[in-house]
Amino acid sequence: MTSSRADLLISGCAVLVPDERELIGFREDSAIVVRGGVVEAVVDAADAGELAAVERIDARGQVAMPGFVNCHTHAPMVALRGVAEDLPTEEWFNDVVWPIESNLTPTDVALGARLACAEMIRGGVTCFADHYFAMDAVAAVVAECGMRAHLGEAFFSSQGREGRERSLEFALRQRGAADGRITTALAPHAPYTVDDADLAATAALAHEHGLPVHLHAAENRDQTEASLARHGRTPIEVLARTGLLDTEVLIAHGTGIDVDRDLPVLERASGRVAVATAPRGYLKFGWPGTTPVRALNAIGVPVGLATDGAASNNSLDVWESMALTSLVQKSVEGDPRWLTARQALHHATVQSARAVGLGDTVGRIAPGSRADLVLVDLSGPHTQPVHDLAATLVHSARAFDVRTTIVDGRILMHDRELRTLDVPSIVRELGERLPALLDRSHARRIQRYDT
């Protein structure tokens, strides 16, 4: 450590320490030294007492964790929370969501993104991967609120070549924005809304410009069966055929991955392939399955945790995604030893960072990592007593137990008080926009769901 004052010193906490074997440990009574947005050192609290710092946080009795990465969401869709309830997937898209989204303006997108970022900061999310429309508005919100984000401008083949070009232009324009906190991706919507020619062109653009790709694929079994019936290939085989599996690609959901056909395809992929799982939405839609996390783990594909959009999930709570991932995996595998709390924490930290291409930057509290971390208070009655700290974090702690959220060494929330967003004003302005946004009398929709 240098002799000059640190920017931030967090002392007295237990620090979550992951390793490559999916084993999670905790370093007790420690201090975290932050300088220039980076973790400079993790030391014993006793050794940090004399260190000088611009700002200090006494975190005695709290747990320091890497901030969560929400690996797949549509942040502005918080404006649609609760408007399309208890519907099958096709009706959800065609009758409610896609007609409403045809009304979206950049103002709506920005307001939704602000509210979503406030929710995520309060829930310990420091980075999110977003796949939506009017994404320059989302990038501006990220710059304003201090979060980290991996952003892609979604497009459909029905938009013609212009949709793909807008996605590329956005990715190039915003790459490295917000003082480097924004990374970008090309964002074709899905194999059932983007044809093979556009998918192949996207793969070529990804190689040419060094960009990753973020899309939905094999979201559920119906999509896989429809793809087989129409094209003789699964959605994952379509990605392989069009060259997308030779790029860096983040696949949202994958509950329709055919273990027998698709896993060998994914294992042969020459690109960096990752999958994001958001189990609450699958349960809510009544899909007969979930992301095959265990099988993907076995072939080395990282699986990050996600919420999807709040229009389907009603929440941007990654803590809930973590707990549900563990519980649902135990159920579908019929094995209480899988997914353990320590494995779930590994998915929530190391694997989620890898999934969005930031595994060398975030996901750990270690020297050289960006200082994206949260402090969790486990003093509440619902988290006491603590016999197994990992189990307490996964199965007992809740988003409201996060006391402090830090990104790049900047405190975005301290003692539950947001420092960069004004929620009452956001809610008030969004409320004024809702009548125009929710109007469906025009009978338009941005796309048709027909897998």
Image (cartoon, grey):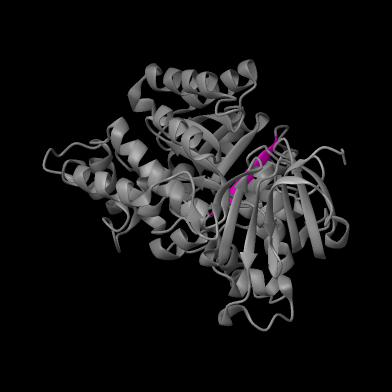
Could you say which is closer to the camera, residue 344 or residue 18?
18
Question: Is residue 200 one of those drawn in magenta?
Answer: no
Question: Which residue is depicted at the point 87% across and 39% down?
Answer: 3
Work out which quarter of the rendered image holds the N terminus and state it: top right
Q: Locate residue 117, reporting x and y percent.
A: 46, 46
Work out which quarter of the rendered image holds the C terminus and state it: top left
- Segment tinted magenta in the rendering: 272-277
Eyeballing the image, is 123 above or below 156? below
Farthest residue, direction left? 441
Q: On the picture, is 442 further left or further right than 82?
A: left
Q: On the image, which quarter does residue 208 sit in? A: top right
Question: Which residue is depicted at the point 63% across and 73% down?
Answer: 378
Q: Locate residue 384, reporting x and y percent.
A: 64, 82
Q: Locate residue 415, reporting x and y percent.
A: 55, 60
Eyeballing the image, is 281 above or below 174? below
Could you say which is closer to the camera, residue 341 or residue 397?
397
Q: On the picture, is 378 further left or further right than 215?
A: right
Q: On the picture, is 155 further left or further right than 15?
A: left
Q: On the image, which quarter does residue 36 sit in? A: top right
Question: Which residue is depicted at the point 57% across and 62% down?
Answer: 402
